[in-house]
Amino acid sequence: MIGIFDSGVGGLTVVKAILDKIPEYDIVYFGDTAHTPYGTKSAETVVGYTINNIKFLLSQGAKVIVIACNTASSVATTQVLEQFALPIFEVITPAVTQAVEASANLNFGIIGTRATISSGIYERKILAHRPTARIHSVACPLLVPLVEEGWLKKRETAMIVKKYLQPLKTRQIDTLILGCTHYPLLKNVIQAKIGKRVELIDSSICIAEGIQHFLENQRDIEQQLRQTGRLSLFVSDVTDQFKKIAQLTLKTNISFECVKI
C-alpha cells in the first residue's frame, strides 16, 4: 500500500496523478484538515505533524510513504528519513529535476507557502543542478485557504493570483514551479496570469512519475504492495466544502473516514 499525506485537500492532486499513472496499487490517504494550513506553522510543529501522519499511515499498512505537502517536504524530510526505515518520497526533488530540464533560459519562478519559500529548499536544489540559474521566489499565503474554501473560479482569486505573479512576470521567468500541491487546482488561472509561454511545473505529476519509475526498478518493494486498486481516504476533520473539492479533484464520488491522531 502507498501511503500519502498532506495538510488538506491539496495532496489529492498527488493521489489523482498516481491513480492516473499506476491505478493498480492500493492507496491510503490522510488529509490533516484539522491543522491546515501547514504553511503558517513553525518548522517544529510541522515536523511533529509529519511524524504523526506517517505513523498513522504505517498503522494502515503503508509500505511506501509520499509526503504530498511542500511545506512538510521542505522542513521535515531530513528528520523523517532518520526516523523511518522505508521508502519516503517528497515532492520537491522531482519538481526541481523536471524544472531544470524544461527551462531554456534558467530563469525560474517559485510560488509556495511562507514556510516553503522561507526554507530556501528550492533555490538550493536548483543551484546544485544549475549554479548560474536565476531564481525568483514569492510566498502566496492566501492561495491554500482559497483552494480549501473552494474559490477556484472566483474573480477575487484571479485578482490575488495576478498580484502574486506580477513580480515574476516582470522578471520574465520561463519556468514556474508550483511549490504547493494545492496549486494545481488553480493551474488554469495561474497559466492565464503568468502567460502561456511560461512552463508550469506541477509537482503532483512529477512525484507520480518518480514513484512509477521507482517501483518499476525496485521489484522487491513493488511485490510488497497490494494491487487491488483500493483507495482509502482519511481526514482529521470533514467539512462539506472539503468533500466538494475532493470530489472535483478525484473526479469521482468518494467517502472519507474522520480520525483523530
Image (cartoon, grey):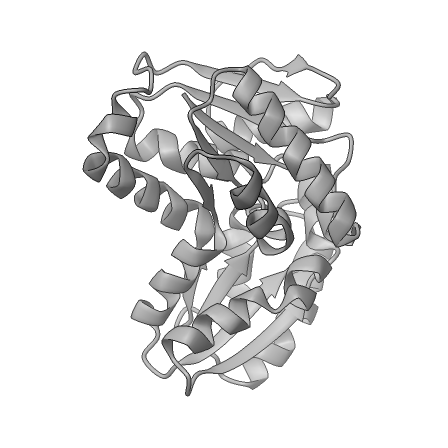
Residue 172 in sight: yes
Q: Is residue 34 left or right of residue 91?
A: right
Q: Nearer the viewer, residue 109 or 246?
A: 109
User: Percent x, y for residue 131?
Assistant: 42, 84
Q: Is residue 26 left or right of residue 192?
A: left
Which picture quadrant has residue 16? Answer: top left
Which picture quadrant has residue 107? Answer: bottom left
Q: Nearer the viewer, residue 3 or 113?
A: 3
Which residue is depicted at the point 62% across and 47% down? Answer: 72
**10 over 142 or under it: above or below:** above
Which residue is depicted at the point 65% across and 70% down? Answer: 138
The image quadrant where one finds the C terminus is top right
Residue 150 in sight: no
**129 over 201 or under it: above or below:** below
The image quadrant where one finds the N terminus is top left
User: Percent x, y for residue 95?
Assistant: 42, 58
User: Percent x, y for residue 233?
Assistant: 56, 19
**76 over 220 or under it: above or below:** below
User: Percent x, y for residue 73?
Assistant: 57, 50
Q: Nearer the viewer, residue 179 or 193?
A: 179
**247 over 154 or under it: above or below:** above
Which residue is depicted at the point 56% across and 65% down? Answer: 121
Q: Nearer the viewer, residue 63 or 252?
A: 63
Which residue is depicted at the point 45% across and 77% down? Answer: 127
